[in-house]
Amino acid sequence: MATTTTAKKVSDTTKVSKSTKLAKNSKLYKTIISAIDDKKGEEILSLDLRKIEVASADFFIVCEASTGVQLKAICDNIEKEVWEECGEHPYKIEGLNNMEWIIVDYVNIVVHIMLPDIRKYYRLEEMWSDGESV
């Protein structure tokens, strides 16, 4: 008698839910801000997107780095500190190849680490101007 098993892909059964809203005083939020500050990230801006229905995250944190080396250092420090303090790994990190704009995605908080020229060009703050600066 043959037995059959049905396997489901993780992507079929796991969905990321945004039902839990984070507060700006959450441990994750504070740890990310501190990690950026530790590596001398500049022009740090946090946008509260919780009231924007179509937003994919509760917060965007945007900061600048003067060089690609500093970009990577900030990214690495965020990843290290969040793991040590909160026990979380990022859902995804993008931009490590071009070293102009790195996105560190923790689902409810998305961090954008950008070179100044890239930040001026894309103007995320204007694109998400419905979000409150915090």
Image (cartoon, rainbow, N blue to C red):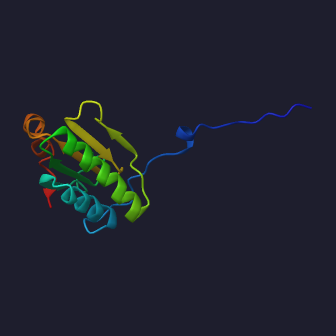
Which percent across, then down, holds residue 50?
25, 56
Q: Residue at x 36, y 58 (%)?
A: 82
Quarter placement of the C terminus: bottom left
Q: Using the rendered view, name the quadrant where residue 4 is placed.
A: top right
- Relative placement, left or right, of 92 versus 50 is right
Question: Depth check: 31 or 5 in front?
Answer: 31
Question: Depth check: 110 or 101 in front?
Answer: 101
Quarter placement of the N terminus: top right
Q: Is residue 90 visible in the rendered structure shown here?
A: yes
Q: Residue at x 11, y 48 (%)?
A: 129
- Relative placement, left or right, of 126 versus 104 is left
Q: Is residue 108 visible in the rendered structure shown here?
A: no
Which percent across, then down, holds residue 103?
27, 42
Q: Using the rendered view, name the quadrant where residue 69 is placed.
A: top left
- Relative placement, left or right, of 63 versus 109 is left
Q: Residue at x 22, y 53 (%)?
A: 49
Q: Residue at x 30, y 35 (%)?
A: 96
Which percent across, then down, holds residue 115?
13, 39
